[in-house]
Image (tube, grey):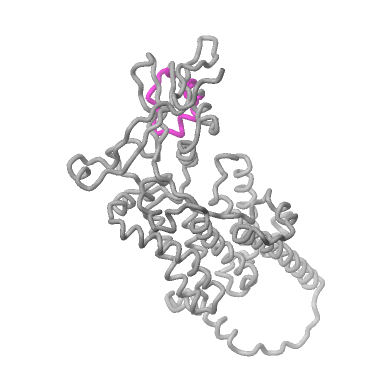
Amino acid sequence: MIAAILLTLNYWPRAALVTCFVAFLSFVSVAQDFSAYQSDGMLLSAGFIALFFAPSGLRPRWGETSPPPRASLFLLLFVWFTIYFESGVAKYFGGDPSWRNLTAMDQYYQNGPLPTWIGWYVQQLPHWFHAAATFFTLFSELLVVCMLFLPRRFRIVCFFIVTPLQISIILTANYTFLNYLVLFLGVLLLDDLFLVKFLPQGWTSELRRNLLRASRPNPQVAPSSETFAARFLKVISAVWLWTSALLLAWVFYAMFFLLVAQVSRGVALPGKPVVWLEPFRVANQYGLFGRMTWARYEIEFQGSNDGVNWVAYPFRYKPQRLDEAPRIYAPYHPRFDWNLWFASLGFWRENPFVVRTEELLLDNDPDVLALFAGNPFPQAPPRQVRAVLWQYWFTDVPTKRTTGLWWRREERGLYAPALGRAPDGRFFVVAWPQALPPPP
C-alpha cells in the first residue's frame, strides 16, 4: 500500500532519503559518545534538507522536468557556508594565539586524529609554507565563502578557491566524510549554465532544451477540465509545498540563530524553535580547530600473562608501528580509533570506555577484538591488560632515509588502571597510573 502511494506521488528518491536519514539519526542517538562529531551533525543537516532538494519521479534524470525549490538549494549552500564561516570565527576569535601569529599549522599534520603519508611530507616543509597555509585557511573561511551571497560570477570564483583547500585537507588528514561532504556541497555554487559547457552533449540535451525554454516567455495555456485524480494530486502537491516551506524556514531560523550566537553574544533571539529541533540534529553549530593540538599522544592496549612481558594489541587505523606509513581511510570513519585519540588528550576518568575495553579484552570479547587488527592471545584471554600512553612525532627526512621509520615515540606511562581478573570473575587493579593517584 505504501509503495503504491509513493509510486503515485513519484517520491521514490525522497523515500530513500527519508530511510537513510532516519537510520543514521537512530545510529547517532544510540552511539552517543562515538557519534558526537560535527561531521555527523552536518550529514544529518544536509540529509534532511536534501529531502526537499531531491527531484521527484521514479527515474528523475537529474530533475530535468522538476527543478528543486530554490529555498532547498540555498539552505544546502547555507550549511556549506556555516561549516566554513563558523570554523573561521572559532579559529580567529577562539582564543588560540597560534592562528593570529600564523603558527597554527606548524605541527598540524602530525597531531590530527589520523594523519596520512602525504601529511608527513607536507610537515617537512618550511615555516613560511605553514604560515601561508594558515593565512589562506583564515582568508577562505572568513572572507572568500561570503561570496556565496554575491552574484553568480563571484560564486564560481569562490568554488575554484575553496575546492583546492578541501582537496588538500582530504589528502593530508582523515577527517572521515566531513570534507567530502563539504566538497560536494560546494559544487552547488556552480549553476547548470556553467556546468553544461563541460559535460557531454548526449548527457545534457534535455537540460539544454530546458535552459533554452527558460530564456523564453512562457506561452499561455488554455484552461482544461481536470479529473478528480488530477485535482487530488494538485492538493497533495500544494500541501507538500507549504509543509516544505514551513520546515525549511524553521531549519533556516535555527541555523541562523546558531550562527548569530557564535558571532555575537549580545543579540538575543527566541531560542525555543532551536531547542525543539535539537533531537534531530538538523541545525548545528560548528567550529573546527578553534584550538590546535600541540602534542600527539596514543593509547595502546597491551596484554600479559605474567605482568612482565607485555604484548600490544595491533590497531587497524591508528599510528602504532613506527615503520608503517600512515594511510588514507576517509571517508570511512573508524570511531573507536578516533575516540582513543580524543581520550589521549584527557584523563581516563573522563573516558570510561577505555577501562571498559580493558575489561572486555580480559574476556576475549569478539566484538571488541574486531576493532583491532588481530588478537595476540587467540587461545585464552590474557591475565592482565593495561592501557599505555605514548607520545608520537613524525620523523624527519634524514631519519626516514636511513631507517625507513615514519614515526618516533616515547612512553609516558599508564593511561588508565591496569586490570586483572580473579578466579571468581571479578576485576581488580594491578597498577594505577602515576598521573592520578588511586582513590581513597
Q: Is 93 on the left or on the right of 51, as rendered?
A: left
Up-down relation of residue 305 to residue 434 (above or below): above
> In the image, what residue occupies the spot 35% across and 30% down?
411
Instruction: Tell me where the magenta segment starts and ends, as one range.
Output: 360-382
Task: Determine if residue 369 is in view.
Answer: yes
Residue 38 shown in magenta: no
Q: Position of residue 159 (x, y in %)?
A: 46, 70
Up-down relation of residue 103 to residue 63 (above or below): above
Towards the viewer: 245 or 82: 82
Work out which residue is located at the far top of the displayed protein and give it: 423
Towards the viewer: 170 or 109: 109
Count up the numbered dots.
0
Up-down relation of residue 392 to residue 233 (above or below): above
Q: Quadrant of the C terminus?
A: top right
Q: Is 245 on the left or on the right of 337, as rendered?
A: right
> In the image, what residue occupies the spot 63% across and 44% down?
26
Task: Determine if residue 14 is in view.
Answer: no
When asked about the image quadrant of residue 235, the answer is bottom right
Q: Main secondary structure of the magenta part?
A: loop
